[in-house]
Image (cartoon, coloured by chain):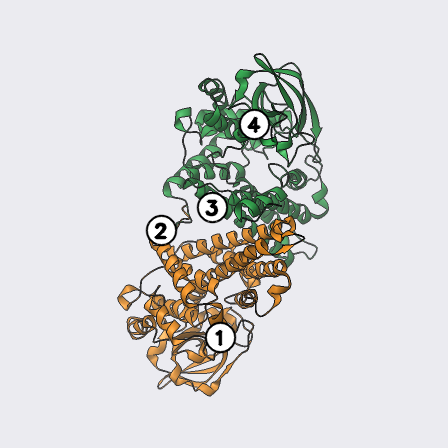
Amino acid sequence: MRYEFTAEEEAFRAELLEWIENEVPEDLRGIGRAASDEEWENELRVRRQLADKGWLTLAWPTEYGGQGAPMMQQVIFNEEMVYHRIPGREPFGTRMLAPTLMVHGTEEQRRKYLPPIARGEVQWCQGYSEPDSGSDLASLQMRAVDDGDDFVVNGSKIWTSLAHRADWIFFLVRTDPDAPKHRGISFLLAPMDTPGISVEPIINMAGHHSFNQVFFEDVRVPKENLVGELNRGWYVAATLLDFERSGVDYPAQARRTLDDLIEYAHSTLGADGEPLSKDPDIRRKFVELSIETDAARSIAYEVADMQAHGEIPNKEASMSKTLGTKLVQDVYGFGVDLLGMYGQLRPGSPRAVLEGRMLDMQLTTVAFTIFAGTTEIQKNIIATRGLGLPRG
Amino acid sequence: MDLSLDDTQQLVRNSARDFLAESVDRLYVRDMEDDERGYTDEFWKSVAELGWTGMIVPEQHGGAGMSLIELSLVLEEMGAAAAPGPFFSTAVVGAHAISAHGNDDQKSKYLPRLVSGELITSLAILEGGASWEAGGIRMSARRSEDGWRLNGEKVFVADAGVADLFIVAARTGENGPPEESITLFLVEASTIENNKMERLESVADDRYYVVDFQDVVVPPDGVLGEVDGGWPLLKQTLDLAAVAKCAEMVGGSRRAVDMTLEYVKERVQFGRPIGTFQAVQHRAAEMATDLEIARQFTYRAAWALSEGKGDGTEVATAKAFLSEKFSEICASAHQLHGAIGYTQEHDLQIYSRRAASAKVAFGDARHHREVLAELMGL
């Protein structure tokens, strides 16, 4: 039992922090949402730097050109990148598609797709959700019909993050409408400039263009772009991947935000002329959020520790996601409240406090307890898979 | 980072599970609630034979020389079994106070007897205001020809009725900050008359007493640590006790969760087990999540104290969290059990009452949140 990082792990943290200090100028650091074109350029620039350091593929096995970094090193990397608001990490290619190809792809697919991902040269997006298939993803209806050397795809994907920036999409289609729903799905790859693919922006409540609806109209996808076996796509997509997926990003983000807010509370006087940090109600809230942060981080560490020991965290991963996403909502919500009247000012507004980030992120994090499995779905998983309660 | 148990720790946990499954059943727990002493000689003898009384006592004094981590594993199982008795007062508080702060003579005199089960100890620090801060200690200790004279009343003195030795905090000076004039004393029970004790009737049937020290004489060698230097020593013991209490609470929480899971799988309403309903599943998921956090916080704090790491955050976080969550888990367990869990016949109430007691022991949530606020620079 050891509740601290090893000297070796701390040495990596020091190296990373030094790199951040020296190589990532303050103006490139942000909240990593990459909503504007300028932020996107920053994103790509830092991503190339990360690729040069080998850190974009820190978690990849060495046989695929990665660093094969131990789990806790990956945890530290993610923690510090988030805490210092460094852009450049890339979920869809490096953390979702690449590991899927390593397990299910053909040798040819791996040779073709992995190196550009590792170099940070290609942006992938993920086509899973459909207008009528959200939490019940396996009910998806987008059809792919066998036609000689190709599949012909018709239908639409929605809530597709970064589809408007992406070069390629990996997506799930129905290839056997008569089979039970989990057994008629296949996993395909297509370039976004394939004729018949069109992207419509969806502006979220924070006012940002992050996700999209993607339409497929008689889109021809060569059969060589099928990953895994035909009609086995559900299981290809659901493969448990060994890369760090502890959810440590959320508490790191919360810790950074709390640190910023504590500084604000020290330097801002309340109506009674005392710093806000002396107000008992505010102190209590800070402490409660700090405990909540610690809780989410502890479970995230537990998930990583299980992975490091070769165990498969299922209920723990769902706990981590549930705790972390609620945490960031609570922290930004508190931030907005703490700023009082100024809490309502948007980023870029005159007089905006803390760059308007509290409001912007309060609105942005509404999505967090919804995406990647809602909190309700996570609790179902904890109860049935984790605690052995019978399914309804 | 490595959160796994080593072989010894697994062995400790398994032997604790096995022994308690054998020797502490629901009837024993109930019988002991009505028992004057709250435990049987047979139970206490077995606990000592297993080496648990001496778990954190150094080997040269007959103990096992283990850490708070191993002790916490045993306490978790005792909490799960709701095992009653003076174990906490003796094997946690007394064993630590004497092992960590005693001089060689005191250790040789008391520790072997504590380990063998012959010596039961009791902590006497709280007074009328029941404050865990230094300022709450007002009992006076004055030098006299024969050593020291203690005068004052202590409340919430656990297991006083069976204790052979009291660890008493008293004030040895009136000037300066309250932290700098507290001295710890080892007071043998024989020097206090039994009629100066009055048992309190508390929710979980803890053996809490009011003990009135009237001109109690303590010889010069009864000072534990340095004169006026007692507070930092007491703080160490209280921190350790807070974490140890958390371990017990983790065990109790775990049992409440397990009982609830068993019940909702079996209880049929509307033609199916109520555990199939999402309203029930989600509450169960929340209970299990809180339990998991509780476990992580507790063992992290136990590790930190064992290794001399950390700044107090680990301890305060654990106790602030457990003080609220053990009760909340029990409240959810009651809700999911419905009427049956509300009966005295059912075991669940044992744990809810233990939660009500444990939440205020060694500092309640508010106390530990304030510690955290200070540590956060607020």
Single out the mark in the foreground, 1 or 3. Answer: 1
Please tell me which residue lies in front, A331 or B311. Answer: A331
Percent coordinates x, y for residue B309 in the rendering: 40, 54
State which chain is coloured orange: B
In the figure, A21 relative to B324: above or below?
Answer: above
Query: As shown in the figure, which amino acid type bears the numbered disc 4?
Result: Glu
Calculate the distance from the C-alpha at mark 4 to the C-alpha at mark 2: 44 Å
Query: Residue B226: x percent and y percent?
Result: 37, 71
Q: Which residue is mark 2?
A: B6
Classify A133 as above or below B43.
Answer: above
Q: Identify the residue position indicated by label 4 in the image.
A: A43
In screen coordinates, is A346 left or right of A315?
right
The chain letter under disc 2 is: B
User: In which chain is the residue bearing label 1?
Assistant: B
Q: Nearer the viewer, mark 4 or mark 2?
A: 2
Image coordinates of residue A312 in percent, x first then y, are 46, 40
Query: Which residue position is annotated with label 1?
Result: B31
Question: Hey, what amino acid is under mark 2?
Answer: Asp
Disc number placed over residue A302 in the picture, else none = 3
Name the colour assigned to chain A in the rendering.
Answer: green
